[in-house]
Image: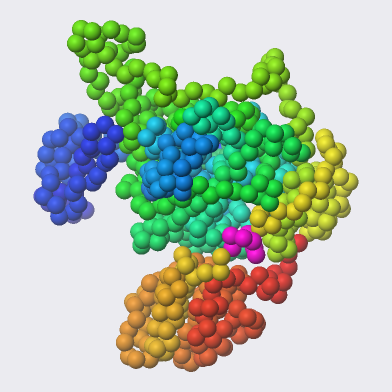
Amino acid sequence: MAKNSTPKSGANSGIATQAGNGGETHQQAGAGDTAVLTTNQGMPISDNQNQLKSGARGPVLLEDFVLREKIFHFDHERIPERIVHARGSAAHGYFEAYEDLSEITRADLFSEKGKRTPVFTRFSTVAGGAGSVDTPRDVRGFAVKFYTQEGNWDLVGNNIPVFFIQDAIKFPDLIHAVKMEADRGYPQAASAHDTFWDFVGLMPETTHMIMWAMSDRTIPRTLRHIQGFGIHTFRLVNAEGKSTFVKFHWKPKQGLGSTLWDEAVKIAGADPDFQRRDLFEAIASGDFPEWELGIQAFDEEFADSLPYDVLDSTKIIPEELLPVRPIGRMVLDRNPDNFFAETEQVAYCPSNIVPGVDFSNDPLLQGRLFSYLDTQLKRLGSTNFHQIPVNAPKCPFGNFQRDGHMQMQVPQGRANYEPNSLAQAGEEGGPRESPSAGFTSFAGRAEQEEQGGKLRIRPESFADHYSQARMFFRSLDPAEQSHLASAVVFELSKVSLEHVRTRVLANLVNVDPELAARVADGLAMPLPKASATAAPVQDFDVSPALRIVRGPLELDTLEGKKFGILIADGSDAAEVKAVVAAVSKGGGTPFIVAPKVGGAKLSDGKVMAADGQLAGSPSVLFDAVAVLLSEDGCNTLLKEGAAVQFVMDAFGHLKAIGHSEAAQPLLDKAGVEADEGVVDAAKFADAAVKRYWDREPKVRILA
Ligand code: HDD
């Protein structure tokens, strides 16, 4: 063994300084800066490369406090990940009110037209761990922290307007059932397994949400293309104390978009961080995603007129029945500076509300009001988690709560109790309650108290589990209905317990006999009789607003989308440039793919650099592709599986394919058939604005 050398190093990497309480944290020095590397005690470090040893090749000394501090800190870097929604991506931004809403709420963020309130928004998957992939079939969390001038308001919703269960006491059962099975520790981030469907079959209240979960909603194209919902009925309360029921809706200005299942599975392999990367890159490039906040506002009389209970989180109020009124917009315009400090440590609590917002008696919401605060203590380790910059209010705040682990504030004086009369002695007396400006809970209706007594019951008005599931299924576009039926077949095919499959089928008969028959056929199982229902199933009017495919939020646009342009040596320079220009002009992002990342030599003799190598840039990463090859280039790529797959997947995923004439043999080899989505390179930008749903029966057998 060669003798160790003992190089000396003066490398300084950087130090972090933190502003005062509630301030923001900034990295102040990078490689090459002159700031001196120090220990956490501020002592300058002379050598960050070598431990302190007894002799050049001897053992390490316990005395090496520099080493011990560094390793000690490293050993404790991880904190418990969220039990649900562990994998998330977030961004800063602002909310801007469209109008003065003081008629229905005294909340300060809605008090005047144009008023801006900072936000921090975190999107997440639910079931997978923090290191799981971005594209499993799963609900997406949509949590917004509004830093209002009267405190933080957390609207902690999902991309689906209903929930699996009606009462919070079932949440641990639901989550245990969907997460990895207890003995084997798999499957990760997947609902396609025995225990989840066992729970679903036995809990018919999950049926409406199951329809959404098996629809294309749970395989979104990007996080920028999802809708958000507050789900529960909340209250907005004005200065006179008048309450209005509301449901909150976030509509993406980018439009709604989904993937196909085969595509989502392949993205997971090609880029496990696909959605995180997309959000980060879009914001970094100045393409700021935006959502419109809307409310469905209604009174008790309207609520009483509905054939379902507005306190039941498994129900929606169709937009056709009660339109969504836009009240503002959210723009996400800044990536976090540090993933851990912000995205990981952000602590949302549905119990964080502000004057002008209040809860309803929804039993799911009521349980959440306890759970989140409790969970933050376990995750962040201290009751002072509200002092972490991303969690701290941006308005002044103060009270007589003191001490605790990791207290960052340094309160002055003796006033740590109230009432006190220290001010009379010229000392600081501390803050006082404000009966006029402070939050007061909405008093509620007399009848609600009359229903009193301590009861563990599910109200009769929560009994219908199928009518809205039926409405949802029948509202979808036929393409989406096929995807949904196929998703149920896929998931149930992974269920090994036959009686579980049969029970789910029996529940599906109540939703829609034809859907149940399609699923039974897909499983090659007999169709059982309908299961018993607790309430008659009703035929509600369909709600076209619920569609993604050919629905009101599906936008035919290049904006905010990414397009893969496959080139190779000899590709026509003018043609490549024209396609790049057309895509860019429409607001899309062109991404050059070539066999080698250094690029390809085009017909004009110049090398065009690639954004990605073909093997690492499959077409699943793009919204549409252009294949611009010379005859020679095409001949070479005919022997490259990745090139054939690039085209084959684009076609199979119903994407537009623009191509040079010479690329035709590659298209033929990939099994591409002519249709309106397969076009000459010159027409690519026009064709690339959408997917070609009508192509699907040619490429896939669906249930
Ligand atoms: Fe929850 C996290 C959304 C019901 C208990 N939930 C969490 C997050 C979202 C939701 C988006 C992640 C927030 C973040 O980005 O940090 N949860 C919902 C929605 C629900 C819902 C839309 C129903 C309408 N949740 C729900 C119930 C309970 C919880 C009924 C417990 C009784 N949820 C939690 C939790 C989590 C959480 C365990 C995990 C980490 C955290 O809170 O901060 O407390």
Lateral position of residue 43 relative to residue 116, left or right = left
Residue 419 within the segment the image draws in magenta: no
Nearest the camera: 228 or 492?
228
Lateral position of residue 334 relative to residue 264, left or right = left
Q: Quadrant of residue 570?
A: bottom left
Residue 350, image x, y percentages:
51, 33
**Could you tell me which residue is drawn at 68 percent across and 51 percent down?**
320
Type of colouring: rainbow
**Could you tell me which residue is drawn at 69 percent across and 72 percent down?**
694
Lateral position of residue 650 relative to residue 166, left or right = left
Magenta range is: 548-554
Residue 232, image x, y percentages:
60, 37
Residue 6, image x, y percentages:
12, 49
**Could you tell me which residue is drawn at 34 percent across and 77 percent down?**
609
**Outermost residue toward the right?**
529
Q: Main secondary structure of the magenta part?
A: loop
Nearest the camera: 117 or 458?
117
Residue 311, image x, y percentages:
66, 33
Could one spot residue 301 in this view of the protein?
yes
Could one spot residue 261 in this view of the protein?
no
Q: Give the position of the C terminus as an image quadrant.
A: bottom right
Nearest the camera: 308 or 401?
308
**Could you tell me which residue is drawn at 63 percent across and 31 percent down?**
362
Nearest the camera: 78 or 314?
314
Q: Is residue 516 above or below residue 692?
A: above
Task: Report the image quarter containing ligand 1.
Answer: top right
- All told, the count of numbered labels is 0
